Each structure stands twice: as C-alpha cells, then as structure tokens.
Amino acid sequence: MTTRIDSSGKAASVNPLKSSQPLGAAFAFLGVAGSVPLFHGSQGCTSFALVLFVRHFKETIPLQTTAMDEVATILGGAENLEEAILNLKKRTGAKFIGVCTTALVETRGEDFAGEIANIRRRRAQELAGTDVVLVQTPDFDGAIEEGWTKAVTATLDALIETENRIAPIGGRINILAGSHLTVADIELLRDTAEAFGLDPIILPDISGALDGTIPDNWVPTTYGGTPVERIREMGRSAFTIGIGEHMRKPARLLQDKCGVPFMVFETLTGLKPVDRFITLLAELSGRPVPASIRRRRNQLTDAMLDGHFHFGGKNIAIGAEPDLLYALSSFFAGLGAQVKAAVTTTSHSPILAKVPTARVVAGDLQDLEDLGADAGVDLVVAHSHGRQAAERLRVPLMRVGFPIFDRLGAQHKRTILYEGTRDLIFEVANIFQAELHQPSPETLNPFAQRTREKSDERPSLAVS
C-alpha cells in the first residue's frame, strides 16, 4: 500500500491537534534530573505549555520563562536570558537548564548560541555545576516530536564527553525514549532490560520526574530523571536503542561522535516488533529470555485470540503525532480493523509513508472529524481535545497521547511491549463491547415491531 501524505491547507486550525515545538523540548528536558526548562519568550508562551502539563500530569511542573516584554523584544533579549539563567541557578540550584526558544525571539533572528556562550564565559563562577543547553524551537514550525528530538540531540551533543571511542562498558545500553511513551512505558522498558542483567541509561526519563511521587521536601527542579553524570557516560555504552523514528537523529549522533552502534524500533506495540526487541536484548546480554517474559508473551497471544473478534470490520479514525499514529494504526491493522481516517501534526516524518492507510493528512481535529464522518468510523482515537469530534460523530473516544486532562492516570497507562499491547487490546475490545446494544425479545419479534410502528403512526386525539 502506498500512503499519500497531504496537508489540510487551511489558513487557520480548528480544534488544533498539535502542541508546540518548545513544549516538546521542555517535555524532554523534564526527563533530566535536577533540571528546569526555560522558555525564552513572553509569559504567555510559557503559561499555555504549563497549563497543558499540569492538566495532564496533575503535578507541579518546574517551567520558567525569560518574560520578554515589548522593549526587550525590540532591542534584544540577551539581558533577560542572562538574568533568568542566573536567577534559576541561585534560587533553585538547578544542575541543568534547558533553554527553549519561542517564535517571539526567533522571528527577530538573534544569535542565541553566541549569547549563551558569552553568558557561560562571563558567569563561569556563578554557573559552576550547572549545564545550560540551548535548543531552537520556534512555535511556528513542527510540533511535540520535533521539539523532543531537538532537545535530546542538543543534550547529548553538549554533555557526552568525547568524540573518541573509549572501550564500552559491558552490559550497559542506551535507550532513547520517544515522546509518545508514558511513564509506565519507560518503567516497563527499564524493568525488561534489567531482567536480562543489562544496565540501561534511559534518556529522557520522565518516569522518575513525572510519575506522581510526592517528595518529602519541596523541590524546585525535577526530582527524578536521568542524572547529568549518566548522560555524560552514554558514549561508553555498548549499544543504543531508539524508540520511535524521531529518535534516529540522536542515536546517529551517539554513533558518529562515540562509535556506539544503534537500532531504531519504529514501534514496540504489537507481537512482532516486541519479539524483535526481546531478541535483541537476549543477544546483547548473552542470556536466554526469562520465564516471566515468556509468560507475558503467552498472555498477549491469548489476548489476541480473545480480542480480535471485536476488531474485525471496525473503521478507526486516529489523530496523533507521527510515531504514535504509526504505532496505533499498525496495532489496529494487525488485529483486523481498518484505519479510515488518519490525521497527524506534521508531514515531515518519514514514518508516515508506512502508516497502513490510503491517506494521512497533516491537519487538525476538524479534519479528523470530517474524514471520520465520510468513512463512517466506529472509534475516534486522539487526545482529550478530540472528545467534541467523537460526540458529534456519535462514536466513543479512546484517549491517547498528550494531553489527557479529563481522565486520571494517563501517565500510568502501558502501551508497549507484551503487557502494554495486551492492555490496549482489552481497552479497545471493552470500548466496543460497551457500545453493543443487546437485542430484546420485542426487537426480535417482527409482529411486535410492526404493531409498535403502526401505533406510532396513529394521530393523537386531543381532549379539551
């Protein structure tokens, strides 16, 4: 099947599907221990992202801004940037500050890299023990995936220690987690790798920072995530595993700078890709697959047998970031459903050509609703902003991705490996079962149905 990739071409988004590129970069920076993402822009740019984070995770989010005003926007924001970085260092003791540019400052064309280099040189003593990493993420381009990729790539480029190949540490692997993975997914990746005796360094690791743990004392930075010291050592790992096509660029950076070989898994949802992942872990560790993992595989195959009856003949509409769209569409297609409407945030990702549907549209949730209405879909799959479209289409909504703010526990939902695929099968099958209307004796009796229709046709007599 050849997938056609189109753009909606509208002048304005109606019920937007995508979130901004700086939000995606800040999301990735939240997976670094002791970090504070810093938006270089106005307060409004930060407040929108902060609202989405808080509503999704129901947690305190350490997100700050340089608070550019009219004068700074016209004359340049270097002073605001320097003041913000020094204040964060002084007040929070952050070990890592991730600077995300916004459209406000990008359109002016400032030399951000040069400004940060000057700040670090002039303020070396005040900033001792704190790494400052810049990523240029204008709001008018890209979405969460692009921002996430840029942040991970910039972090590795700034922190890995050498361009020369050093003897790798046996049993240590890097796992570059995609933006579509949940807290529970990352915890599952770590547990699975450790079950083979491997030592995984996961970046970004939002499982420690956004998992709902309440620290004993107030912490003004992220209180979990990948330690900066561990990131510096990623060049000495034996292998790198990228989860999602958008993790190919940082994986290739590690290979080019440090010689670390890599493999990118386009999805870890579904039996075949998970089998390949488990086989790779067994090869890297030199150990057989543990019995507990074999048992979970058996549970998945049983779930596929039990659940596929509910998928056959169903038409699905999916709106998601490219890698999540591919993972979910492959999942549905593998169980007998058909993806009739597919909408994503950007047309740049090469993974879109592999989505098992005739056409993918880079657009908004109105596009998804229109395509779904034309195809007569049975289920809408999108984040919480898709609920209005599902209501108008009179079909259920399966909530995935970011943000999910009208349900609790989205970050603890598993979507990958054997356990996550099994859970998704049960979730979808239960949604379809809940929509079934069981026949009653009256509806099965054609004579009773005919009598009821005739009584409905009789004119009513008004009694005065």
Image (cartoon, rainbow, N blue to C red):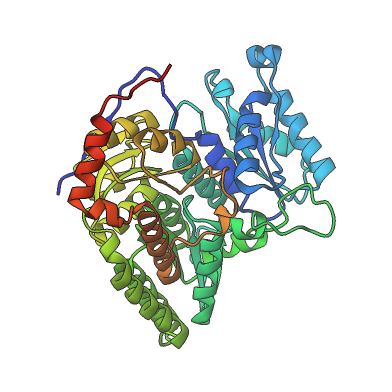
Q: Residue 5, percent across and down?
A: 24, 36
Eyeballing the image, is 297 above or below 308? below
Q: Residue 95, percent across and down?
A: 73, 51
Give the side of residue 290 with respect to residue 123, left or right. left
Give the residue displayed 46% in from the left and 49% down from the top: 400
Give the residue displayed 50% in from the left and 74% down from the top: 193
Residue 191 in which image quadrant: bottom right
Q: Residue 286, percent across and down?
A: 42, 85
Q: Residue 275, percent across and down?
A: 33, 73
Residue 365 in which image quadrant: top left
Residue 262 in sight in this render: no
Give the side of residue 398 with respect to residue 44, left or right. left
Depth check, front residue: 438 or 165: 438
Give the residue displayed 29% in from the left and 69% down from the top: 272
Q: Quadrant of the C terminus?
A: top left
Q: How many marks?
A: 0
Residue at the left extreme of this rendering: 1
Eyeballing the image, is 282 above or below 253? below
Depth check, front residue: 317 or 262: 317
Residue 226 in sight in this render: yes
Depth check, front residue: 275 or 161: 275
Give the side of residue 450 with respect to residue 52, left or right. left
